[in-house]
Image (cartoon, rainbow, N blue to C red):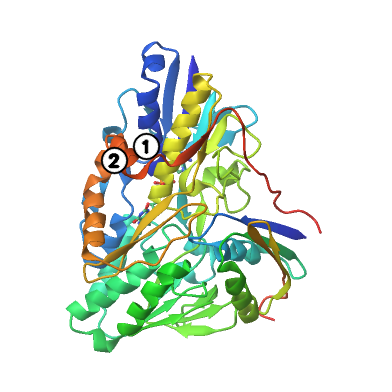
Amino acid sequence: MKRVVIIGAGTGGIILANALSKKLKAEMKGGRLEIVVFDGSESHVYQPGNIDIAFRGADPKIFRRPITQLLSREVRLFKRPVSRIELDNRAVIYDSGLKMDYDYLVVATGSVAAPETIPGLAEASLNFHRSQEDARRVWEALSTFRRGRIVVLTALPHKCPPSPVEAVFLIDELMRKKGIRDEVEIAYATPYTRAYPAHGIADVVEPEMEKRGITTYTLFNIDYVDPSTKKIYSLEREELAYDLLIAIPPHRGAEVVINSGIGGEEGWIPTDKRTLKIRGLDDAYAIGDATDIPISKSGVVAHLEAITTAESIASQIHGMGKVYLYNGRINCPLEMGGRRAVFVSGTYTRQPERQNPSIAKYLMKRLFNRLYWTMLSGALEPIFNIYLGPPYDVNEGAEGVEEVSRDRPV
Amino acid sequence: MRHVVDARGSFCPGPITELIKTYRKAQPGDEIELLATDPAAKSDVAAWAAKSKNEVVEVKEEQGYIRIVIRVTPKGG
Ligand SMILES: Cc1cc2nc3c(=O)[nH]c(=O)nc-3n(C[C@H](O)[C@H](O)[C@H](O)COP(=O)(O)OP(=O)(O)OC[C@H]3O[C@@H](n4cnc5c(N)ncnc54)[C@H](O)[C@@H]3O)c2cc1C
C-alpha cells in the first residue's frame, strides 16, 4: 500500500488532503493508498479572523473549528506533531521515536511570528499574528488606550503582506469611532521604500494614509527595542518613540523543519517555486507559508499550491508523468477601513496593479470569511476553476524548471 | 561569501523582502546578488542601499530580469 503523509492541518494541508482523497478515491477504497495527516492542534484557526479579533473585538470562537470536522472521512488524522522529518529515509518521526514511512510527503507546517528574535520586541510589543490570544490582547490594549502615540511596526519576513496596513487603517477607524482621534497619533514604520511593497498598491494606500493623518516611516528596519524608554531603534540608526507598540514580528518556519536540518536557522524549506517539490527530491513537496518561495505567505497561496500539488501527486501515483507547475497566482484582500477594500492580485509574471478601493471588494472579503469553511472541503473548486482557471501550467513529462544555487563562496 | 537571492517572479512582497532577509544574516564584506523581475527593484534597492549605507556594486539588465550586486558594509556604519 502506498502512503501520502501530510504534515500540518492548516489551510494548505486540509485543502490538499481533501483534494487528494477526492482524486484518489478508488485507490483508497481498494486499500492501495492511505492519506495520513499529522497535526498536534485540536482546532484549525482561520487566521484572517485575527484582524476582526484585534481591531473589532470579534469573538475568537467564530474563527476556529475542530480539525476532525474539516477533513474528509477517508483521511487518517494523527492528532500529534511530527518531531523529525527524515527526507533521506522517507520517514517521519512522532511520539518520541515512532516512525512512519511515506511514499510521498507534503510539508505544510506554516510559519510562526517570532518576536523573541529581536531584542526587546517580545517584551515591548503586542501582535495579532502569533495567535488568537495575542490578537485579543491587542483589542484589550486598544480599548483602554486614551491618548499618545500608537506605532504599527513591520519586520520581515511575515505572512499576509496587507495585514500591517489593514491594522493601521482599522486603528484609525476605531479611534475616530471612539471620538479620540485628535488625542492619538498613529505612526506606521515599514522596511519598504513605500507604504506597501507593490508600488501599484502603494499608489492607492499612501494618499489615503496622508488624508487620515497617519505618519509613515519608510526604510525602517528594526534592530532592537528598549522597553524601559519605549523607543525602537533601526538598523539605519533611526529611533522612534511609542506609547503602544503593535508589531508584525519577523516570522520563522516550524520548529520541526529547523530541527530536521531542512530549512536553515529560520526554517524556510528550499522549494522549487513551480513544481513545489523540495529541491533535489521527487517524492517530497512543501506548500504554503513553510517554503522559501519569494511569494506572499498567504492562505490564497497555500490553497493554490495545495491544488497544484494534489494534481502532481495524483499524476505520480497514476504513473501519468505529468508535471503541474504553479503559476504564482495571488489574490489578497486589503481592507482600508470605511467598508472599502482592494485586492492585491498577480502571478509570477504579472505584478499587482493599481485599483480603486470599493465597497464591493470589501463585501467580497466578508463573504469569503463565511465561505472559508466550505472552501476547505473542496466544494467551491469547480466555481473557482470556471471564473479564474487553474492555478498551474501542465508539462507533459518535462521538468521545465530552472535551479539557482543559493549561498556560495565568492 | 556571495549570497544569491533569486526573487524573480516576486512582486508582492517583492525583492526587498528577500534582500533584507539575507542582509540580516550577512557579514560585512559579503556580497548579495539579487535577481529580480519586479521593475521597481532597481529604484527600491538604490533607495535601501543609500539609507542603509550599503554599496551597490553592479546593476545589470539580463534577459527578462535585473541582476543587482550589493556589498555589505558594517551595519550601522
Ligand atoms: C492577521 C492575519 C491576517 C491574514 N489575512 C489573510 C488574508 O486576508 N488572505 C490570505 O490569503 N491569507 C491571510 N493570512 C495568512 C494565512 O492565514 C496563512 O498564510 C495561511 O494560513 C498559511 O497556510 P499554511 O497551510 O501554510 O499554514 P497554517 O494554516 O498556519 O497551518 C500550519 C499547520 O501546521 C501545523 N504544524 C506545525 N508544526 C507541526 C508539526 N511539527 N507537526 C504537525 N503539524 C504541525 C500547525 O499546527 C498548523 O495547523 C493572514 C494571516 C494573519 C496572521
State the residue position of label 2: A375
Residue type indicated by callout 1: Ile
Residue A1 place in picture, x, y as percent: 49, 14
Decide which of A269, B7 is in the foreground and name it.
B7
Give me the residue at 67% from left, 44% from top: A403
Element type at mark 2:
helix
Does A383 sit above or below residue B14?
above
**Disc 2 vs disc 1: Cβ atoms closer than 8 Å?**
yes
Residue situated furthest right in the rendering: A410
Residue type indicated by callout 2: Met
Residue A339 place in picture, x, y as percent: 21, 67
Image-based side of A180 in relation to A330, left or right: left
Element type at mark 1:
helix
State the residue position of label 1: A15
Image-based side of A105 in relation to A34, left or right: right
Occupied quadrant, residue A170: bottom left
User: Can residue A103 be seen by looking at this rendering?
Assistant: yes
**Chain letter of disc 1?**
A
Residue A353 place in picture, x, y as percent: 42, 63
